[in-house]
Image: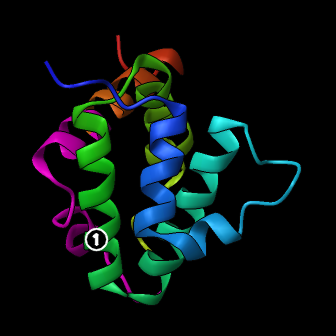
Amino acid sequence: MAELIDHRGFIKLLTEKFPSVVAEIDDCSQGLLHLEMGAFSRATQAAIDTGDRDTVRRHFQFIDEIFSQAAPDVENAINVSYLEHLRFNGRKATPTRTLELLTPRLRVALDDLEAYLDKFHGKVE
């Protein structure tokens, strides 16, 4: 069985693939998984907002790879501090066109998250 990707592993992979995102993590956020994941979420959102489909696709592929082997804390951070904060209707992106870039695993995770939030907020019985 492959080793799970923990917080340290996530940061290592993020640094290798997206050093510019890591450079945006300030001293107050460094070492805090959810804030670091939030920095990556903001970078993805910026790409969604500008219609940069290539970057969005690369970000979703990266998160999918992490998610497939994530330790529980990293899986939670992906759901809570990444997926939950993305808006799929940026200035140049339409929800359908951006959502189609999600990998199947991330699409299921997003659907599950939205169902949970709807139930939590009383929108579904």
Place of residue 23 in the rendered image (x, y in percent of width and height, measured from the top left): 68, 71
Q: Residues within 10 Å of mark 1 (few under 14, many from 20)?
A: some
Q: Which residue is mark 1?
A: 58
Quick check: is 102 in the magenta stretch? yes
Residue 90: x, y in percent? Answer: 46, 77
Kind of residue at disc 1: Arg
In the rendered view, tell whether residue 38 sits above or below residue 91.
above
Taking the spot 63% from the left edge, 58% from the top edge, the residue there is 39
- Kindly tell me whether residue 87 is visible in this rendering: no
Q: Is residue 40 left or right of residue 78?
A: right
Q: Where does the image place residue 45, in percent across and percent down from the top left?
A: 51, 69
Q: Main secondary structure of the magenta part?
A: helix
Instruction: Specify the segment rendered in magenta.
Output: 91-110
Q: Is residue 120 above or below residue 114?
A: above
Give 83 or 40, whichever is nearer the viewer: 40
Circle 1 SS class: helix
Residue at left 30%, top 57%? 62
Residue 45 lies left or right of residue 67; in this view the side is right
Residue depicted at x 31% and y 77%:
94
